[in-house]
Image (cartoon, rainbow, N blue to C red):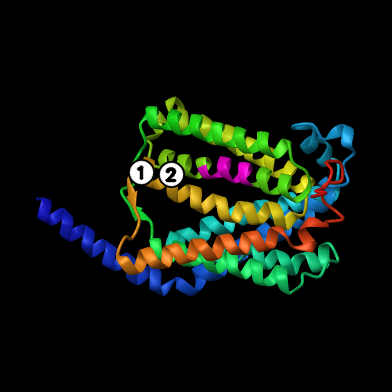
Amino acid sequence: MATVRVTAGLSSGHHSGHQSDKNRPMTYVLALCASIFAATGAALQHREVAEVPEHRTGGIALVLASLRRPGWIIGLVVLLAAPVFQFLALKVGTLSQVQPVLTIELLVLLVIIVFTHHQHPGRREWLSSVAIVVGLTAFLLAAHPGGTEGVLSSRWQVGLALGSLVLVGLLWAIGSMRHGWSRAALLGAAAASAFAYQAAMSKSIGQTPASHLLTSPGLYGYVVTGGLGFVLFQHALRAGHVAASRAAMVIVNPMLSVAIGLVAFHETLAHTPPAIVIEAIGVVVLLAGARSLSASPLITGDPLGGAGEGSDDE
C-alpha cells in the first residue's frame, strides 16, 4: 500500500512538473504583473500619505485621513491587484518560479517614480537595487526551500503569533526613535514581518477543515496581522522614501517566510556545498546592495517622504 502511494505521488509530481514547465511563461507574466501593480500602488500611496496633516497621522488615523484622498484610493485599488496576480501566478506555477520574479518590484519601482515623483534614479540606486534583487534571487533559487506542508497545531499558531508580535513591536519601537529613510525601512520591515506571519497562517488555514476554521487561532491571527501590517506599511510610506520601505519589505518578507517555514513547517533548504556557497554569496550581495542603497542621495534626501516625521540629519 505504501508503495502505491509513493508511486502515485511521484507520478503526480512528474505530471505537475510538466504542467509547471508548460505554464512557465504565463507564470512569469503574472508574477511580473504582481510586481508592477505593487510598485505602482506603493508609489501612488506614498505621494498621498506624505500630504496628510501631522495632527491626523497617529495610528490608524493616518489610514482614515488617507481614505479622503482620491489618489490614495486609486493607489489602494492598484495595490490590491498585486496579491490577485500573485495568487494567479501560484495557481499555474510554483513558488520557486514566482518568488524570484516578485523581487523585481524594486527595479520596477525605480522606473515608476520617474513618472509619479519626477525623480531620476542614478547609477548608485540602480546598481544597489540590482544587487538586492540578484542576491535575494540567488539565495532563493539555491536554497530552494520546501518540504513538509501541513496544518499547524493551535500551540504553534499562537506561538508564531506571539513571536511575530514581539518582532513587529521591536522593529516599531526602534523605528519610532529614528527619522526619515531609516524609520521608513524599519517600519517597512515591521510590516513585512506581519505579512510573513499572515502568509504562514494562510498556508495553514488553507489546509484546515472548514468545520474547524472558526476555532483556529490562525484565522484570527491572519486577520489581525493583515490589518496591522497594512497600517504599519502606511506609516512606513509616510516616514521616508518609498524605495526605502519597499526595499525592506522585499528583503524581509521572503527571508522571514523561509525562516518560519524551517521552524514551523519543518521545511528544508538545499545544503550541498555548491548550494551553501551560492546562498552565502547571495546574502553578501544582498546586504551590500542594501547598505549601498541606504546611503543613496535619492533615499536620504527624499523631498516627498517624511512630511511630518522628520528626516535623518546624520
Q: Is residue 167 above or below residue 239?
A: above
Residue 31 seen from this side: no
| Distance CA(mark 2)–CA(mark 1) | 7 Å
**Neighbourhood count class around disc 2 (C-alpha, 10 Å): few under 14, some 14–19, many 20 upward:** some
Task: Report the amino acid beneath label 1.
Answer: Phe
Q: Tell me what residue is drawn at x 84 percent, y 37 percent.
A: 65
Mark 2–mark 1 CB contact (< 8 Å): yes
Between 252 and 151, which is closer to the camera in this rendering? 252
Q: Is residue 131 above or below residue 243?
A: below
**Residue 124, position in %: x, y?**
71, 70
Q: Left or right: where does residue 121 sit relative to residue 107? A: right
| Residue at the extreme front of the image, as rendered | 314
Q: Which residues are magenta?
A: 189-196
Q: Residue at x 17, y 56 (%)?
A: 6
* Badge 2 amino acid: Ile
For residue 258, side relative to residue 266 (left or right): right
Q: Does the magenta run of residues contain 93?
A: no
The numbered mark at residue 260 is 2
Residue 192 shown left or right of residue 204 in the figure: right
Q: Secondary structure at mark 1?
A: loop
Pick the residue in front: 188 or 217: 188
In the figure, 207 relative to 219: above or below?
A: below
Residue at image mark 1: 265
Q: From the viewer's perspective, is residue 220 above or below residue 291?
A: above
Which tag, 2 or 1, sits closer to the chain's start? 2
